[in-house]
Image: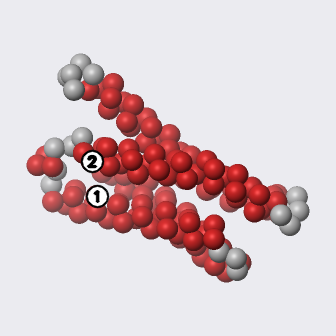
Amino acid sequence: MSQSLAPAVTGIRLSLHVLAATIWVGGQFTVAGLLPTVRGLGADAPRAVARALARLLWPAYAVLVATGFWSVAAIPSASETMAWKVVLGVKIGVVALAGIATWLHGRSRSPGAVAVWGAIGGISSVAALVIGVFLAG
């Protein structure tokens, strides 16, 4: 790639990653905040809202994973310390946990399982975001 295009490509990659993180994490917090109101709209309303949100969240998660791997590929491996690489490995695990927990949350039928998987998905999503900030800094 031309050196003159490198900053633009980096800007696009990082912008896509941040936008996707905003949708993934922000969407989870938004629906959690709206849930008491949504429940008042009827018994089927929470599930309908969850399905609608999933149409936004899962593509955002895919973009996060793709741009995350793209970001790692853009860094010369010799330029980062072993500690940085360990933290990156932890982040990848946390991102996987966030996706799995959120997927299980959407498939759960008992209120307890919905709550547990939702909490794990939300906490691990925030943890992945924070770890990413530390890795970038």
- Residue lying furthest top: 4
Which label lies toward us, 1 or 2? 2
Left/right placement of residue 23 relative to residue 3 reads right
Residue at left offset 50%, top offset 44%: 20
- Residue lying furthest left: 78
- Estimate the x, y position of residue 75 in percent, counting from the top left: 21, 43
Q: Measured along the vertical axis of the image, is residue 104 above or below residue 81?
A: below
Q: Which amino acid does label 2 sit on?
A: Val
**Which mark sits nearer the N-terminus, 1 or 2?**
2
Tell me the element at label 2.
helix
Residue ID for mark 2: 72
Q: Quadrant of the N terminus?
A: top left
Q: Residue 87 is drawn in which quadrant?
A: bottom left
Q: What residue type is labelled 1?
A: Leu
Q: Nearer the viewer, residue 87 or 107?
A: 107
Q: Measured along the vertical axis of the image, is residue 59 above or below residue 90?
A: above
Name the colour scheme.
secondary structure
Residue at left offset 35%, top offset 61%: 92
Q: Nearer the viewer, residue 86 or 107?
A: 107
- Estimate the x, y position of residue 39 in percent, counting from the top left: 83, 63
Q: Nearer the viewer, residue 68 or 35?
A: 68
Residue at left offset 88%, top offset 62%: 42
Viewer can see residue 33: no
